[in-house]
Image (tube, rainbow, N blue to C red):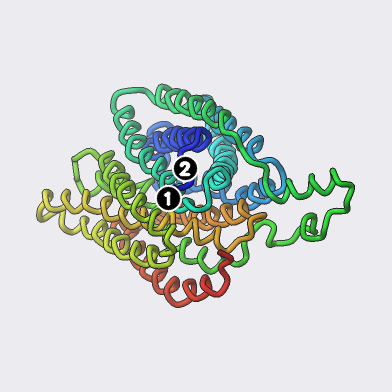
Amino acid sequence: MAKDKLFTRSYVCILAANFLLFFGFWLLVPVLPFYLKETYGCEEMIIGAVLSCYTVSCLCVRPFSGFLMDRFPRKPIYILCYFVCVMMFPAYTAAAAISWFIALRALHGVAFGGVTVGGNTLCVDIMPNSRRGEGLGYYGLTNNIAMALGPMTGLFMHDHFTYIQIFISGMLVSVAGFVCAVAVKARMPESLRARRQMEAAGDTPAPQVTRKLSLDRFILLKGIPVSVSLFLLSIPYGATTNFVAMYAREIHITAPAGLFFTFMALGMGASRIVAGKKVDRGYITQCIHVGYYPVITAFFMLSMCRFVAPADIIVATAMFYMVPLLLGAGFGIMFPAMNSLYINLAPNNQRATATSTYLTAWDVGIGIGIAGSGVIAQHFTFYMVYLIGSALCLISLLFFTMRVTPHYYRNRLR
């Protein structure tokens, strides 16, 4: 039996738009801590607080963006948010004071929160249901490729170019992504299509089509248990992506820190493709369980680099670069499975709400991870951040096994 076509023009365009959006994002991630320290003289704790405001603003807007995209045409909202993201890059160069930088970073977070919910939901809309796991795997793979190239490029540019040139480069990449986003042909949300059909027929909308606002219009209530597990996972992830370059300097690893992100992306890329096909065959919770083990091991190894480095820097460096391969493999297995799990818990008219709940849980942990790691690093060192992160992932695994898995099988809709 022939498979439904996955790589349509719109699907390829949204893959390109997502890659270029995240490339611009990852270009700045490892550079911003240095920028804040060198430009504004910020300490680690302040850097963590400033960077976390981006995630907090992302978090605040995600539930509302999910609601809006379930109620109104998704593409115009997606395009507007994408445009704001593009304009933030040159705006950073005009921030003369740290307060202005914080305001711009928060606005960037609002726009990024909207564009990621929109992109993920549009991607689900335009792909065939029979290949959803595989399609989400490729969509996530664009994030991983951006993660491989963006930080490495950003750190290279930090050593050879000015900050203004870095910000302008991010803008140019995002402009190319914006053009691809405009080319996507979007489908109308099912809830909006049903309402317009009833209005055209002169009927009164049914209660399930236009109902009063309630909490479940902004948050997928059935997704709360899995959100707890995802939240615990994302705390050490946020600390790693934002501070691993500083940690490498702290323990005197002189090899390029940008390779850390490259190896993580390689691990994610290889595992995502395989995991996506397994998800399409129904192995959702099984994939998530398998993904936990390399992640827990990786964060523990990363913390132990602090003690191995004084004795043997070569062994410590080898451990340091083994960590991202394990992290990439683990998260690459879990991401498409987690995304599909949320979608399977939601009715079709709450697809964007499911996506926003998934991303909101991730953002909460990322924000706490960034802010908390700055505080912990200032009082201890970064090794304690990753040791705590390993423990949090273990707790997440136990909760997922005992609470989330049975809840999912009782409440899934497909």
**Which amino acid type corresponds to the residue marked 2 in the rendered image?**
Leu
From the viewer's perspective, tell me whether residue 294 is left or right of residue 216: left
Q: Is residue 134 above or below residue 262?
A: below
The residue sitting at 57% across, 40% down in the picture is: 115
Instruction: Return the residue nearer the eye: 387 or 237.
Output: 237
* Residue 7 image label: none
Dot 1: within a 10 Å radius of its alpha carbon, few (fewer than 14), some, or many (20 or more) residues?
many
The residue sitting at 34% across, 62% down in the picture is: 291
Between label 2 and label 1, give the one nearer the viewer: 2
The answer to whether one can see residue 53 in this image is no
Rendering coords of residue 183 (x, y %)? 56, 28
Rendering coords of residue 234 (x, y %)? 43, 57
The residue sitting at 45% across, 53% down in the picture is: 133
Q: Are marks 2 and 1 in contact (CB under 8 Å)?
A: yes
Instruction: Return the residue nearer the eye: 298 or 21.
Output: 21
Dot 2: within a 10 Å radius of its alpha carbon, few (fewer than 14), some, or many (20 or more) residues?
some
Of marks 2 and 1, which one's residue comes earlier in the chain?
A: 2
From the viewer's perspective, tell me whether residue 84 is left or right of residue 67: left
Q: Residue 284's quadrant in the figure?
A: bottom left
Q: Residue 288's quadrant in the figure?
A: bottom left
Q: Residue 387's quadrant in the figure?
A: bottom left
Rendering coords of residue 384 (x, y %)? 31, 60
The answer to whether one can see residue 337 in this image is yes
The CA span between labels 2 and 1 is 9 Å
Disc 2: which residue: 6
